[in-house]
Amino acid sequence: MTVRSENEVLTRTQKARQQDIIAAAIVVLDTDGFANASVERVAQEAGTSKGTVLYHFKSKEGVHEAVVRLLYDNGTAYMAERIRAEKSSRDRLRAYLGSNLRFIAENAAHVRAVHRILQNAGGRIEVADGVEPLRDLLATGQQRGEFGQFDPQVVALMTRALIDAASFHFTAHPDLDVEHYVAETIRFFEKATAKEES
C-alpha cells in the first residue's frame, strides 16, 4: 500500500475544490447571468464559503479567468486527440471542423458562460484565436498537393469566424441537428479547399 504525503492529499483536495467552484461558476453564469454571478452566489452553488472561493481564486475575475481557461484547455485537448488520429491534411481538416463544432454542442452551458464573461470583460481576458494552427494545417495540405490554391491565412480566418458564430447559434438552439450542421460545414470547406479541375 502506498502512503501519500499530507501535501499531496492537500493538493488533490485543493484541485477538487477548485473544480467544484469552477463548475458552480459555470452553472451560475449560465442560469443567472453575468451581473448576478457574484462570489457569494458562486460559493452558494458550490456549497462552500465566499472565503474559500477567494482563497483559491483571489477575486471574481480570477474565477472568470479559470472558467475561460478550462473551456479552451478542454477544447484544445478534445480536438487535438481527434486531429492527431488522422493522417492526411484533408482528414485532419474534417476532424478539426467536426471536433470543434461537436465540442461546442456538447459543452453548451460552459460555452454560454464564457460568452458572458468575454462580453463583459472589456478585453481583460486574452484568448487564443486559433487561426495560426489552422493556417498551418491548410498550408501543409497545399504543400502535399491535397488542397487547391488559396490564401491559407484568409481561409483560416473565415473558418474561425464561422465556428465562432456557430458557438452562439448552437448554444441558443439546443434542438439543432448538430450532425447535419457538421456535415454541411465539412462539405462547404471541402469544396472551398479542393484542387481546381484541369
Image (tube, rainbow, N blue to C red):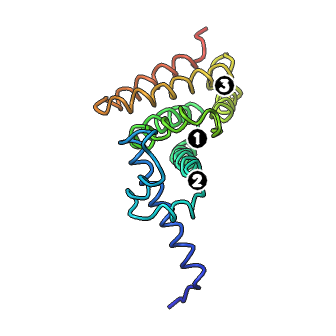
For residue 45, which quarter of the picture?
bottom left
Residue 87 circle label: 1
Residue 87 place in picture, x, y as percent: 58, 41
Identify residue type, mark 3.
Gly
Q: Is residue 123 left or right of residue 105?
A: right
Residue 184 place in picture, x, y as percent: 41, 22
Picture quarter with the C terminus: top right
**Eye-nearest disc, 2 or 1:** 2
Residue 84 place in picture, x, y as percent: 58, 45
Of pointers 2 and 1, the one earlier in the residue sequence: 2
Secondary element type, mark 2: loop
Q: Residue furthest right?
A: 143
Relative to 133, residue 27 above or below: below
Q: Residue at x 46, y 58 (%)?
A: 21
Label 3: how many residues lie within 10 Å, few (<14), some (14-19) or many (20+)?
A: few
Residue 81 place in picture, x, y as percent: 54, 48
Relative to 94, residue 75 above or below: below
Q: CA distance from mark 3 to mark 2?
A: 51 Å
Q: Residue at x 48, y 60 (%)?
A: 50
For residue 93, which quarter of the picture?
top right
**In the rendered image, which residue does mark 3 sit on?**
145
Secondary element type, mark 3: loop
Identify residue type, mark 2.
Ser
**In the rendered image, which residue does mark 2 sit on?**
59
Label 1: how many residues lie within 10 Å, few (<14), some (14-19) or many (20+)?
A: few
Which of 73 and 67 lies nearest the eye of the viewer?
67
For residue 151, which quarter of the picture?
top right
Of pointers 3 and 2, the one earlier in the residue sequence: 2
Identify residue type, mark 1.
Lys
Secondary element type, mark 1: loop
**Eye-nearest disc, 3 or 2:** 2
Query: Looking at the image, do the residues carrying marks 2 and 1 touch, with CB atoms under 8 Å apart?
Result: no
